[in-house]
Amino acid sequence: MMKFAVKEWAELISGPISMKEQDQQIFKHADLPAVKDKLSITLRLKIQKHFSDWSTIFHKGTEHLIRTPILQLTPNKSSLHARFTGNWGSNFGIGALDDGLTLKKWHHIAYTLSDPEKRLDIYLDGEWVGFYCIEKVKTHKVVFNDGPLHIGRAINHHGFNGEISNVRYFNWRLSPEEIMEDFINEYQRKPIVYGSKIALIHLSTGKYLSTKGVKYDFGPNNQQYMVICSDQEIDSENDVWTLVEANGKGINEGDPVSLNNIIGFKHKSTGYCLHSHNTNNGKVTPISKQQQVTLRPGEIGVDDEWLIRRYNLTTSYDTGHLMNGDIIGLFHNKTNKPALYSHAVLLGDGSQEVSCSGDGSESNNKVSNIPFQMQLFSD
């Protein structure tokens, strides 16, 4: 009789849920996909603070050294510590990756383990970052167990302080392509929060909101750079913006961004604010003679505040929180809310003019936000 391996997976936690050191979620062995000799676990994790002791993310087993699989965070640094139990000993795997997890930032983590391939692999934010190989492939085997799966506190170790979501358990070893797909899918409709690094794409032309360091001539005491739409390939410095609170709003980094709200943007490379001003004294764009959009040094002020709105399919304004991939309009708050605008009018260097113009109803007013992480660059 022919036998077929059946691929099964289950999402154990959709979330996100908050967890403290003593919190745990327990899943019975019988409720998990049946594992023969391979498994994978993927999840999203945001750590609030490091601990001076080991912290458990997940641990399957009934005792401390029955641990296939286990993933912990190292003391003080929160580096990933991935292990398993073998038939030649109880504790093998990756000691610690070089870099610890960044606090208060969502990370995508994938743990894959295969006895036939004799290896354990760890992926962070879609990238392969560590592995362990079994050397004696004829005699050494991974020992799987029928104990429960603990998320958070388990056996002799406390859990983590933070949030976790999208915990998925697979009964096969995910390929790098499957892990990348899981990572990207998790970021496709995730909330944008204050402190997020994003790119803004002009939908009509597919070009990124950017600068090339060209200054408007406002005199020696008023240094402002021209904002443009540059290329269809992202520049990891000049096309990236940090979303920040508007002046005096009292928002904390990591808070979700509400729509129909006033926000600010800081340019990654220069640290300058996304800015606009009135057209007095001939302060207009070079070609279309519209309201200028610039980069201004200093902290966010009233001329650096933007009203953010999301369009739905009927082009009316939506409510809720800003999500990555949303189609949005940005409206300059101080100058009676004209909308951020660009068009296929080229400047001398081939870049696209950016201005504030109109009520936001034109296709040239629409931009899409993309989390910087989704472009597979490092923060």
Image: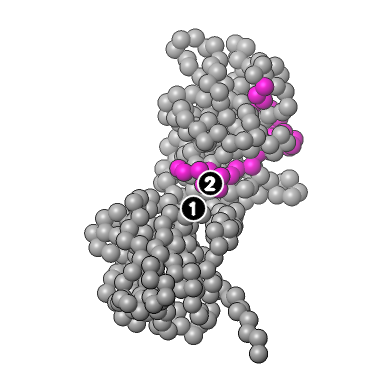
Mark 1 or mark 2: which comes first in sequence?
A: 1
- x, y percent for residue 87: 35, 79
Left or right: 353 in relation to 197 = right
In the figure, 348 relative to 308: above or below? above
Residue at 48% from the left image edge and 38% from the top image edge: 242
Q: For the residue marked with disc 2, what is the amino acid?
A: Leu
Left or right: 239 in relation to 247 = right
Residue at 31% from the left image edge and 80% from the top image edge: 63
Q: Which residue is mark 1?
A: 127
Q: Nearer the viewer, residue 362 or 47?
A: 47
Whether residue 18 is in magenta: the answer is no
Label 1: element kind: strand
Whether residue 360 is in magenta: the answer is yes
Left or right: 62 in relation to 309 = left
- x, y percent for residue 120: 43, 65
In what quadrant of the picture does the N terminus appear? bottom right
Distance from Cα at disc 1 to Cα at disc 2 = 8 Å
Q: For the residue marked with disc 1, what is the amino acid?
A: Glu
The crowding category of the residue bearing disc 1, from other C-alpha atoms within 10 Å (few below 14, some 14 to 19, many at least 20), is some
Residue 290 in view of the camera: no
Q: Quadrant of residue 133?
A: bottom left
What is the magenta range? 350-379
- x, y percent for residue 282: 62, 12
Residue at 50% from the left image edge and 80% from the top image edge: 36
Q: Are marks 1 and 2 in contact (CB under 8 Å)?
A: yes
In the figure, 27 relative to 243: above or below? below
Q: Nearer the viewer, residue 101 or 132?
A: 132
Q: Which residue is mark 2?
A: 376
